[in-house]
Amino acid sequence: MLVCFAIFYGYMVCLILRVYSKTHSNKLPLLAVEYLRPAQSYKVKVLSLDSDQYRQLFIEEAKEHIDALTKSMLILEKDPENQEVVNMLFRSAHTLKGSSGMMGFKDFQALTHTMEDTFDDMRKGSLPSRNLISLLLECVDALSQRLGNIQNHLEGEIDFEQLKSKLQSLRSQISSVPLKKEKDPQQHFQKKGSFEINLSDKQIVKQAKEKGEQCFTVDLRFAQDCGFKSIRASMILDKIADVAKVIKSVPSSSDLDEEKLNQGFKVLVTSKFDEKTIENCVKQVLEVEQVSVVLFNEEVSVSPVKDVSALFLPLEKNYTVTIDKTGVTKVIIDVQTNQTVRVKLDQLDKLMNLVGELVINKVALLQVTADNHGDSLKRVTENIDRLTADLQDLVMQVRMVPVSQVFDRFPRLVRDLSQKKGKKIDLLLEGKEIEVDRTVLDEIGEPLIHLLRNSIDHGIESPDERTKSAKDETGKITLSAQRNGNHIIIDVSDDGTGIDPEKIKTAAIKKRFGSQAELEKMNKEQLINLIFLPGFSTAKEVTETSGRGVGMDIVKTKISSLGGTVHIESQVGLGTKTSIKLPITLAIIQAILVKDTTETFAIPTRQVSEIVRVKKNDVKALGKTDAIIVRDHVIPMVHLHQLLNLPDSNEDELELLIIYLGDENTKMGLVVDSVLRQQDILVKSLNGVLSGIKGISGATILSDGQVVLVLDIGRIVKTSRKA
């Protein structure tokens, strides 16, 4: 009898797993379960390393878990008693251990196993020390290095024995003072039958009560050694459905994960039957250790930080860190139900190129239609114009990613540097949800690193110095992003010493960046902007992070190459704020087509303030420079053909483009023969020997097939001045 039951049970489990794998293939872990014989237990089958598909899936999942480990440990360092974070750490380490073992990466598996044991000690009540957190972060760095080797197909294991030995040694020294235990989920549920519901759920509950039914919360736990919890949870939902209507469950029916179900299973139902009837239905499923059915209390308020439901959310959700008024750091998990799909970046680039070609042909079609007076043709063209614009907007949105993908790297950077410098610093991140084009996002990481290093090195004072200045001994650096039309503004501000223009002047004279007479004529803003010069630094000595005078130069150069600007505001003793303004996208942009002599050029509209028509007689000589007066303002001007060494056209009437140079406060007039029109263009980057030409951002193709260079006037003027 037992043998027959075992055969039937094994067959049913195989059948269920087969159906589940077809409908939930994206939720299966990186392992294959193979039953050898009906009466025997199953074994885990290691996946072949020859499979690039599984390797890539492991890499992507491992990166997410490694990021989660880093973020969670930084939170735990500030709030060592946060059991939610400890549970997240344990789950990530446990998942990494299992998936790396399935892939055959034994060194990866061994280190994550030791980390998992350490997190398990914390779950049992041990308080992590700062030294332990630092060592665990070193382990995460080692895992990242090993993952990079795996991604680059570099064979050979890394020796993690030293890290494992250090971890085991520190584990024995951890304080065994019990943590504040989080409330047992079962007790929390049973207390008043609380359940967080939305307006739609409330409406369902209200309608059920009008029919004479009652609303209950069903709270249960599976036995600790229970297998196939997800299958049993599905069976429980089916059983409950016989006597009640299921409104929602935690975890949800579409996301029944084994790890989440270890914390319990909670279901909200409406039924005309009593509690005992519903409880008996649940108990029909084997391996249910505890179950309680209580009336749902709609008036109970739910804590902003969800003690239990937060634990059930999958890793793919967005984790953010906030600091409340008491200074306690908490994990808040942004619940988003939008389904997503991973797309390769090169495929997005190809899609963007195709849309660009479509835009070019759309412009050609519009020009042909303008010459043809047929109403039906114009109507079709207008529809194509509208659809193309919608498609272009949609593709641009697909390419947009939140700046959090870059911002989230910096808490670890600030933490490590502040400890190395012996400073206390809090990093606040704001506007992480703001989206920019992937191309822009990939380029802004390096400039932001230099700005943060500057704030840590030169801005924030030591705790003793801050105390003497009547400041909080913990300095504050704020990294924020905000949308401004078609631009994004990123601010890096600190409450440190600020930039002293007199010190800048002294350093500039000492390093011969200008004579004392020249520097005396400069105002405060001009002196501060000297820090962008290559080789300029006020540091007294060269260190690992500063003193070489390349950081701010890199910031200025990189941001300028992206068509952006950098502006610094600073007050001595109060702090410094550096603002970066960048275009949202660099792919399809609006440009002004101009003609000078016989050549046509494109100038991005973001570089142009206004366009003025002038006559040659209005141009005045200002020393060696031509100038013109526009609304009582003297604007220095330069001819485009002079910058590009083209012949003079001798036109009597000229078009003057007022161009931004570096920032919005510095302007210059650019003289061209004529302004043709404004239109959307697809910027193609220049490759090979052409890629190094300064002042040429790229090229575009017009509707008539003409290839036109896209100019960066600021870079051209800067290069010509140096020459």
Image (cartoon, rainbow, N blue to C red):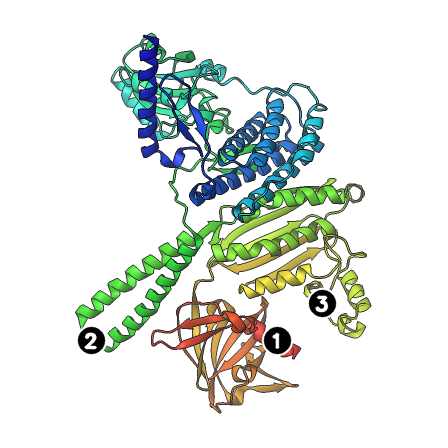
Q: Earlier in the sequence, mark 1 or mark 3?
A: 3
Along the viewing direction, whichever of 222 and 36 lies nearer the viewer: 36
Q: Is residue 300 visible?
A: yes
What is the secondary structure assignment of the residue under circle 3? loop
Pair 1/3: label in front = 1
Residue situated furthest bottom in the rendering: 650
Pair 2/1: label in front = 1
Identified by mark 3, the residue type is Asn
| Marks 1 and 3, how far apart at CA | 24 Å
User: Which residue position is annotated with label 2?
Assistant: 373
Identified by mark 1, the residue type is Thr
Q: Is residue 237 visible?
A: no
Q: Residue 404 shows which numbered tag? A: none
| Marks 2 and 3, how far apart at CA | 60 Å
| In the image, residue 381 above or below residue 439 | below
| In the image, residue 702 above or below residue 9 | below
Q: Earlier in the sequence, mark 2 or mark 3?
A: 2
x then y, percent, for residue 274: 31, 9
What is the secondary structure assignment of the residue under circle 2? loop
User: Which residue position is annotated with label 1?
Assistant: 719
Pair 2/3: label in front = 2
x then y, percent, for residue 107: 59, 35
Q: Residues within 10 Å of mark 1 (few under 14, many from 20)?
A: few
Q: Residue at x 54, y 44 (%)?
A: 150
- Callout count: 3
Q: Do the residues under discs 1 and 3 have CB atoms within 8 angstroms?
A: no
Q: Quadrant of the N terminus?
A: top left
